[in-house]
Image (cartoon, rainbow, N blue to C red):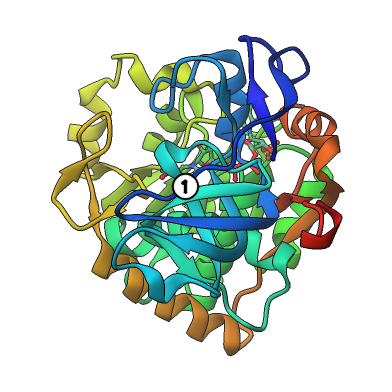
Amino acid sequence: MKAWRVVRKGSPREALELQDVALPDPAPGQIRVRTSATALNFNEIDGCYGRYRTVDPPLPYTLGMEAVGEVDAAGPGLEAWIGRRVATTGLGATGAHAEWVLGDANMSFESPASLDDEEAAAFFFPFHVAYLSIFERGHLHEGETLLVHAAAGGVGSAALQLGVAFGARVFATAGSAEKVAFCKELGAELAIDYRSEDFVPAVLEATGGRGVDVVCDLVGGEVTTQSFRCMAFGGRHMMTGFSGGIEAEDEGGLVPRPILFGNFSVGGVLMAYGESPRGGPMQVNLVPRAVGESIQARLVEWLDAGRIRPLVGRVADYREIVDEYERMEARATTGRSILRWPEKDAR
Ligand SMILES: NC(=O)c1ccc[n+]([C@@H]2O[C@H](COP(=O)([O-])OP(=O)(O)OC[C@H]3O[C@@H](n4cnc5c(N)ncnc54)[C@H](OP(=O)(O)O)[C@@H]3O)[C@@H](O)[C@H]2O)c1
């Protein structure tokens, strides 16, 4: 089967090769999915460069975190998955950009029937990550305000939509005039190009000087420390991603004073579902699978009611993966970028 392999560290163009590899068989706890569509994740670019320490397998390995397709084989006891169309996470968050993917059943969900394959691929990660950030960990309450950074992106646009669907006042930052307009279309009350304007005074003004209750921070670095200047009393700043520079994930340097003086909380968010309390190569705290299932049910309810929708920014042939990563790296994408994989009969 064909698979996009990271064969050396470097830019996606330098790092990736489309290779033929053996069809894998599922072990206990795993399902095998015949890929129809895969979504591009920003962290996969970090993976190419070798700067993503959370997912850092030895070379060569198949890149890709998530895929949509039909389950055609399953580990013992998981036969009920066979024949279902799912969104799955590749084992160790790798292996998805391939014709077949081995997925962790705990990190797989049946795709809503109302979505086509590309839409289904744009639904799973963005909305689960955003839901965990805003509600499960950020505890957004009725009548509160939400600030989303990189709000025109894959996860960001999902967070923005969820906040709006919940009835919150949502403020957004994004990196161009077009993206700002896109955030407003999605229902942001205030959208700021944070590459040309300081968002802190704008957020303080919009909240009558009080500050914002919950921040879904997908950028990190300076954007994080800036956000600390516009947090409300009792606010919750959710560190959810580091698209401004993944290296910040492993750096020290959070200055305690603004947190203490601000009377707000700083929290972390990792979408990793499992049955045991801890797991994965880094022994992280897992979110119980049952929480993932209840989030999926709530998301499907909101999807069916037309309150949220997956945003497919671009659809490309799987052979064009490098061009698509380059667009993403250049901050030129909105919503989710999706790759389409060949039909079964064309393989
Ligand atoms: N916690 C979790 O479990 C989890 C799971 C999946 C993804 N994530 C995180 O979610 C974030 C968003 O992922 P995504 O796949 O949806 O990507 P994305 O947001 O669609 O793309 C990345 C965006 O980040 C912004 N950005 C800010 N500084 C940047 C820089 N220096 N270089 C490039 N882009 C920069 C850009 O938007 P602007 O131009 O608008 O700034 C860019 O479009 C990532 O940080 C990822 O790590 C977290």
Instruction: Name the residue: 38% across, 68% down.
Output: 144
Residue 168 in the image: above or below residue 37? below
Residue 41 placement, left or right of 218: right
| In the foreground, 97 or 76 | 76
In the image, 194 versus 266, the foreground residue is 266
Asked if residue 92 lies left or right of residue 302, the reply is left
Q: Quick one: label 1, few (<14), some, or many (20+) residues within 10 Å? A: some
Residue, x 38% and y 27% (percent of image)? 54
**Image coordinates for residue 146, horizontal then vertical, percent:** 46, 59
Q: Residue 314's spot in the image, x, y percent?
A: 82, 51
Q: In what quadrant does ligand 1 lie?
A: top right
Residue 244 is left or right of residue 275, and the answer is: right
Please name the residue shown 64% across and 31% down the image: 21
Q: What is the quadrant of the N terminus in the image?
A: top right
Q: Secondary structure at mark 1?
A: loop
Q: Which residue is mark 1?
A: 25
Residue 148 drawn at (x, y percent)? 52, 50
| Three-letter residue code for mark 1 | Asp
Asked if residue 170 can be seen in this view, the reply is no
One can see residue 120 in this view: yes
Position above or below: 251 against 257: above
